[in-house]
Amino acid sequence: MTVTAKVEPRHDLSPMELDAIEDHLYEHNSEATGHDDGMGLGFVIRDEAGAAVGVVSGYTWAGVSELKHMWVDKTHRRRGYARALLDAFVGEARRRGVRRIWVASYDFQAPGMYEKAGFKRVAEFSGWPEGHVNVILCRHFEEAPEMAGNTDS
């Protein structure tokens, strides 16, 4: 018997719906790999009034980490905030046993900052968007975290 699925357009999924999708994907991935150690990972820098002026977020899972979001308010850039957030992210990922961290950064964002922090370009997609390049970078740690003397290296 063939069931015909009705595909409904939904271009405005709520954060709750997106979280539910993430939960389903995590459940499937955990069952497929035997790894169920996924955890969110993030840091915030706030100004004197308590407003967020810089944020980094991602996750750790199965010995890898994805840095999904990095943002510093325009008025607070060029003060070292992005590097401080990145260093905190890498340090915590290492404490959790991560061996690889990956991030996507457009050429007009910050691939150079990631490269200065030890990330290497592993892929480039030209024309994403037109006239620009989407750069995928990875930082690989050769030694286990407990053997790494300095987690900032």
Image (spheres, rainbow, N blue to C red):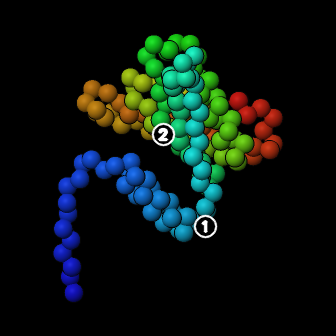
Q: Where's the N terminus, which quadrant?
A: bottom left
**On the image, numbered disc 1 is attached to which residue?**
34
Q: Is residue 126 left or right of residue 123?
A: left
Mark 2 crowdedness (10 Å alpha carbons): few <14, some 14-19, many ≥20: some
Q: Establish if 151 lies above or below 47.
A: below
Mark 2 secondary-structure assignment: strand
Residue 107: name its quadrant.
top left
The one of 150 and 45 positioned closer to us in this rendering: 45
In contact (CB < 8 Å): disc 2 and disc 1: no
Q: Is residue 147 left or right of residue 26?
A: right
Residue 38: name its quadrant.
bottom right
Rendering coords of residue 108 (x, y %): 38, 23
* Disc on the earlier residue, 2 or 1: 1
Q: Which mark is residue 68?
A: 2
Q: Establish if 82 lies above or below 119.
A: above
Q: Residue at x 66, y 46 (%)?
A: 98
Mark 1 secondary-structure assignment: loop
